[in-house]
Amino acid sequence: MRALPALLVLAAVTLSSCASAPRPRVMHQVDSAREAPAAREAASLAPQAFARAEQLRQRSLRAFDAGDRSGAQILAEHALAAYSRAVILTRLVKAQSELARAKQRLTKAQAELGTLDEQLAKLSAEADVLELRVKVARDAQPLAANTPSTPERERARRDAASALASQARLLCTAAHMLDARRATLPDHFAKLDALDKQLAAKGAQTPIDDATRLRSACLRELSEVRRRAVKDGGLADALLAELSQPGNLFPFRDDRGVVITVRDLFTAAGQLKADAEERLAVLGKVAKAHPEFPVLVVFHTSRTAPGLDAGRAESVLGALRKAGATRVETRSAGSALPVVEPKRGGARERNERIEIIFVSPA
């Protein structure tokens, strides 16, 4: 009987020690992690992962209440890892959402950029048209009649008239290539033929006024044909950019269209050089890819070698056609449009050249 009180006291001490045993530290860490703002955000953005963490936390609490301290600690560690996973998933969801919004902003910006590019191209084309109209109108203004002058001045006038007549013929030829049925062109060509005869006649007064008027008329014809044929003014810009890509063609634009100047194409025997065939093949392929641009090949000679070799002209045309060019014509400008003064040293090499002109339809 005396042993019974001692047993009761021992049991009471044991129960008291169990009731006051502290929770494992990791369970407090779980509570802190659960109350953190990131965890609360995870409850809405990663609900399944958060629910899993909550489930492990509850199991840890039940294990501790049942006196299973080791089990409670293990479950709490799993719960802490689950909360961390929920937070990471939340960050991933937010990152994916931000990525989607960034892609939307990028798509919108690209669309706006495309619209701005279109507007810029349209404004550029309109500016080119207005500039050409101003030029045509300015050239069409009546000029004061030229009176006879000194022999030196007359020679200068004759050279200028020959250049204007040659430019006029090339402009009218470009208009004819774009619209072969244009009714007003035959009259201009007839006037140009008559003008050439006047320029060839010795002793006659230089018809520079007629040459000026014919050049203005042919430029006006070309601009009218373009205005009626094609509305897209960006075609020549695109072709110019394409021909600039190789880096060795050096294209430029003038009233006729996009121009490539080539020299030194032939051997001493009059045969096309290998590299010349390659260059012409490139241009022929471009012409094939852009059939809306007829090709005008203009041969420029020098005063020391004024004649045009028909065989060489046919060789150039044949190389272009072989590469795919279909609308090709050739003209000779003679020595009327020199690049440098013919009397200067090396003038022949500079002045003898061939222009490959992609006649712009707009």
Image (cartoon, helix red, strand yellow):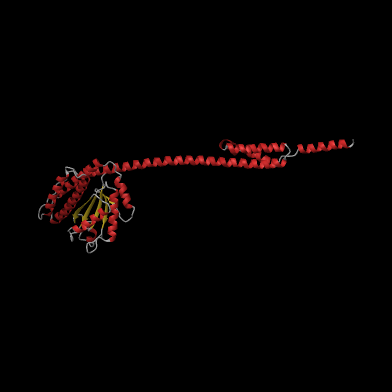
Q: Is residue 6 visible?
A: yes
Direction from residue 44 to residue 126 in the image, left or right: left
Please state the total of marks drawn on the protein image: 0
Residue 82: % across, % down: 62, 41
Q: Is residue 16 left or right of residue 253?
A: right
Q: Position of residue 110 (x, y in %)?
A: 41, 42
Q: Is residue 138 visible?
A: no
Seen at 77% across and 38% down, the residue is 18
Residue furthest toward the right? 2
Of the 4 image quadrants, the one containing the C terminus is top left
Residue beneath the point at 17% across and 47% down = 214
Q: Position of residue 273 (x, y in %)?
A: 26, 61
Q: Using the rendered view, name the quadrant where residue 319 is placed.
A: bottom left
Residue 175's place in the image compared with 304, above or below, is above
Residue 22 versus residue 74: which sits nearer the camera? 74
**Observer-nearest of 175 and 198:** 175
In this rendering, would 38 be left or right of 141?
Answer: right
Which residue is rendered at x = 69% and y = 36% of the image? 62
Q: Nearer the viewer, residue 98 or 15?
A: 15
**Residue at the left extreme of this rendering:** 203
Q: Position of residue 261 (x, y in %)?
A: 26, 55
Q: Which of the 4 image quadrants contains residue 265?
A: bottom left
| Quarter of the figure that contains the N terminus | top right
Residue nearest the viewer, comparing 148 with 123: 123
